Image (cartoon, grey):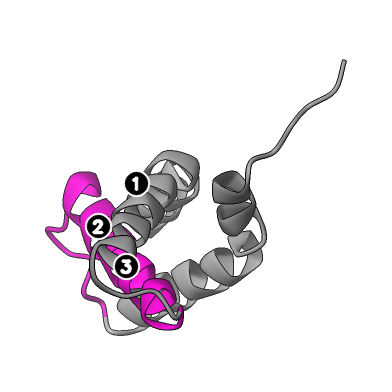
Amino acid sequence: MKIIITENQYRFLRRQSEMKDKIDAILDSLADQNDLRGVGLTNLLLIVSDTVGRDIADKTNLTDDDYITFRNQMIQYIRTNFYEDIKDFLESKQ
């Protein structure tokens, strides 16, 4: 059985290590500043995914609707695929 990866999926897969590095950097920064008190999982997930998604989308050459679509897809990809990592991190710090 062949697995076909579309160009759209490839855009996310090739940036996965960059996403992981940025997520870890943000979480470490928040932990160092003790800014995790009172922050729920939902809020932390929104903060991290929006920040990382916007940072990665800003580095692309996309404009207008393509930029917005890519940014939103990136944010959703992070929320879906890094949920457990962020949840585990938050639980370890509380």
Label 1 or label 2, whichever lies nearer to me, is 1
Q: Estimate the x, y position of residue 60 in percent, counting from the top left.
A: 46, 78
Label 1 or label 3, whichever lies nearer to me, is 3
Residue at 20% in and 46% down:
42
* Left or right of residue 67: residue 21: right
Q: Estimate the x, y position of residue 73 in percent, counting from the top left.
A: 36, 50
Q: Amino acid at mark 3?
A: Tyr
Q: Earlier in the sequence, mark 1 or mark 2?
A: 2
Label 3 or label 2, whichever lies nearer to me, is 3
Q: Which residue is mark 2?
A: 44
Residues rendered magenta in the picture: 34-60
Q: Amino acid at mark 2?
A: Leu
Q: Which residue is mark 1?
A: 76
Q: Is residue 21 above or below residue 49?
A: below
Disc 3 secondary structure class = helix
Q: Between residues 80 and 33, which one lies in front from this camera angle?
A: 80
| Residue 90 occupies quadrant | bottom left
Disc 1 secondary structure class = helix
Q: Is residue 38 magenta?
A: yes
Q: Earlier in the sequence, mark 1 or mark 3?
A: 3
Q: Residue furthest right?
A: 1
Q: Which residue is mark 3?
A: 67
Q: Between residues 14 and 29, which one lies in front from this camera angle?
A: 14
Residue at 32% in and 67% down:
67
* Left or right of residue 79: residue 3: right
Q: Is residue 26 magenta?
A: no
